[in-house]
Amino acid sequence: MTVIHEINTLVWLGELSRRYGRRVTLGDVPGEVWDEVARPGVDTVWLMGVWERSPAGLRIGLRDENLLRSFREALPDLTEADIAGSPYCVRDYVVDPSLGGPEGLAAARVRLAERGLRLILDHVPNHVAPDHPWLTTHPDRLIRGTPDDLARDPGAYLEAAGQVYARGRDPYFPPWPDVVQLNAFSDSLREATVDTLVSLGDQADGVRCDMAMLLMNDVFAKTWGASAGPAPAEDFWPYVLPRVRARHPDLLFVAEAYWDLEWALQQQGFDHCYDKRLHDRLCHENADSVRAHLGADLAYQRGLVRFLENHDEPRAAATLPGPREQAAAVTVATLPGATLWHEGQFEGRRVRLPVFLSRGPREPADDALRAFHDRLLPAAAAVRRGEWAPLTPAGWPDNDTHRTLLAWTWTHAEARHLVVVNHSDRPSQARIPLAWDDLRGRAHRLTDLLTSQAYDRDGDELTDPGLFVDLGPWQTHVLEVSPCSSPRPGTHG
């Protein structure tokens, strides 16, 4: 199953340059660093922000007081040299020379492949930089306005290359000041998007598509109305993705997706879509809410990306203090679907860095949290094999704390695993019946892969009334279940 590690490429290379006392680009990252990236349990690296950033977009950003305020909050000793512009304000899909250019990226991909890792890169289908070549060569690929539109609403339009264009936007927020809106209904844009993605497929093993739902016909029509022209009969992604896959059949497509459109985007061809609902429920809601989410169709769940943070979200260490973060991490790491880990998450970084910046603040590493993740990632890789099934913890009349427990099994021909998470700030007890009938008649050892603690239990008890579990606030079990070499029911290891 896909496990992605997101790296802020520009910031990471800057940190490596300071660490080694020389300029480090993608082409000359030391092998020991790639070894650090290739941690057990990770199979895919997302090098976020490798494309050429826009000087015009940077100039706009430097005049935006709201952006500048967010930069100073994240980096109190900010200088203008720390502001590089947004990686999602793309001038061209060519690797930025400052990062090592196309040759550097190709070398990095080889280094990753040598370690068994795939590479994914960004695609921004909704908007481009105000100095992108298309503004002069293919204005029909963009949403255009009039001088009256610009005079009426200068926050929603801009003048570039002698034309008035709409600024890119999400319908629920103000327009982004530094980008120009593409027209998802343009036949020319659709053909160009195919070409762009084919080119990305020549350079990487997968693509993360930014705000993918904005290009869907019904969403785009509601957002842009008559400005977009008539909607084509075929939706955007069903047109684009099969044509790209004709050239790159194994290219992995990951959609940043919101508004409960994940299933629709899966049906339109994406391998995985962000599971923002699970993120929000783990961060803000109770176990019943999480359990309800995990009751969805398994095929749908396999197409989700589980995460606690990414570059758009607050840092998990800042929003989920202490053991709650670890409980949530066990949850996302052991569910079906893809898992996304964010650079710095393992060490407990707390500052969400705006993507415009090339440098982050110095933050001390949380050694205990790093050690926890060092155990969790290989444990999750061992667990997530075979068939996944949710379980229902059972309580008794005078104790309803079982409701705070989340539980599921993974069943494989070579291994069986049970995961239990107490998603609450109070102790919880329950019986968890295991649906493996062949447990009966002999003792089994349950070994926690995170703590190495072992428990020997009678197989009849494990199936009925079920394993007795007593977990403190935010505690977890990640248990490997195997027959004892000699029956010793009821004893502790």
Image (tube, rainbow, N blue to C red):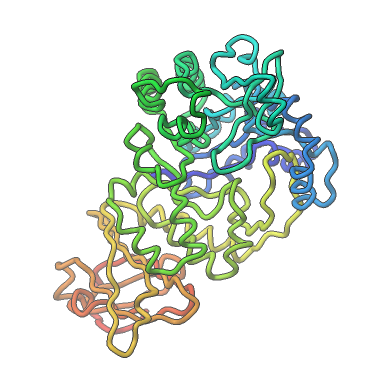
Question: Would residue 452 be seen by someone viewing this image from the given angle?
Answer: no
Name the residue furthest bottom. 398
Please, is residue 146 above or below residue 71 in the view?
above
Q: Is residue 251 above or below residue 196?
A: below
Horizontal and vertical percent for residue 31?
62, 37
Split into 4 quadrants, where in the image is the C terminus? bottom left
Picture layout, residue 6 above or below residue 284: above
Q: Quadrant of the N terminus?
A: top left
Q: 298 or 456: nearer the eye? A: 298
The x and y percentages for residue 268 are 35, 32
Quadrant hosting residue 108: top right
| In front of the other: 311 or 50 | 311
Q: Residue at x 54, y 17 (%)?
A: 141
Quarter of the image for residue 414 reads bottom left
Percent across and percent down for residue 399 are: 34, 86
Q: Position of residue 437 (x, y in %)?
A: 15, 68
